[in-house]
Amino acid sequence: ITLWHRHLGRFLTAMAEAKPSAVGIDIVLPDRSFDAVVPGSDKLLLKGMLDARRAYPLVLALTVDPAGKLRAIHPSFLAMAGAGGAGYALFPADGDGRIRRFDERLGAGGEQVPTLAGQMARHLGIEPRAGLIDYWRGAPFTYLPLHQVLQWFDNNDSGALERAFRGRPVFLGMVLQFTDRQPVPEALAAWEPGAPDIPGVLLQAQALRNLLGSGFIQPVPRAAVIAAVIAAALLWFMSGSTLLI
């Protein structure tokens, strides 16, 4: 993937013809140039990013190293993505390791940081709010293979590209069996029913689907829970008294 500059650049240019509402790249780009290995590769990717910037909002994925520090991306790629063009592809995990929540307070001291799904939502006019991810919202996801998209592009089939992507948010990510898998309480992949984990890109897609829909599930305030318990107790007491009479 590190040397996929040409393919990624072509994909971004193809999306300019497809006219999506926004594109998120859930693949962390390298931190250095590989022109010495594949001459001209940086230029090919930067051209695709430039085509993207002229046609739709683009957001690149950020991640951290094992020490919890930002894993760098080549400055040229970040600069081309522009303001609001990058976000952390991370979610907070619960005690059992599963991901149930969306929250941008991921900093070491609980500071808010931009996330991949959150930045996509902002580009689409929605300010993200923390909450529980509604895994039952929407049908299981399917996907289009990258080679199919690039084949349409190479064949100048703009109609197929627009039918697949026009006006929709698009994520590009990995759906391999052992790469970027995330443990979740409910399977989201139509091709892997009942799987205990899912490709990370589907987690981004489900979070964005919630944000663009009715939002995340919000916990009931503590005071409301206490009031409901008291009301239920009073109702039981009154019913019991009536029966005794």
Image: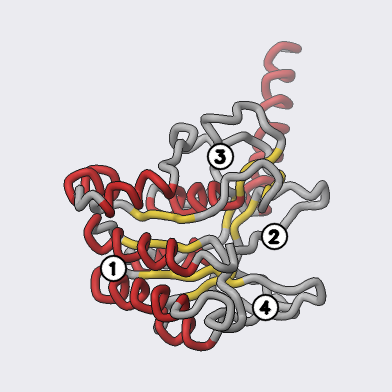
**Residue 39 pos. (x, y %):** 49, 79
Find out whether the residues at labels 3 and 2 contact each other: C-beta distance under 8 Å. Answer: no
| The N terminus, quarter of image | bottom right
Q: Is residue 101 above or below residue 5?
A: above
Q: Position of residue 209 (x, y in %)?
A: 43, 48
Residue tagged 2: 92
Q: CB of mark 4 within 8 Å of CB of mark 2?
A: no
Q: Amino acid at mark 2?
A: Pro
Task: Name the residue carrying label 4.
Answer: 71
The local secondary structure at tag 1 comes to loop
Residue for point 47% across, 87% down: 76
Comes first in the chain, label 1 or label 4:
1
Query: Which residue type does callout 3 highlight?
Result: Tyr
Q: Secondary structure at mark 2?
A: loop
The x, y position of residue 64, in whole percent, is 70, 73
Q: Residue at x 56, y 37 (%)?
A: 188
Q: CA distance from mark 1 to mark 4?
A: 25 Å
Q: In this rendering, is residue 191 above or below 53? A: above
Q: Residues within 10 Å of mark 1 (few under 14, many from 20)?
A: some
Residue 85 against residue 193 in the figure, above or below? below
* 3D distance between C-alphas at marks 4 and 2: 18 Å
Among numbered discs 4 and 3, the one appearing first in the sequence: 4
Q: CA distance from mark 3 to mark 1?
A: 28 Å
Image coordinates of residue 222 in percent, x first then y, are 68, 53
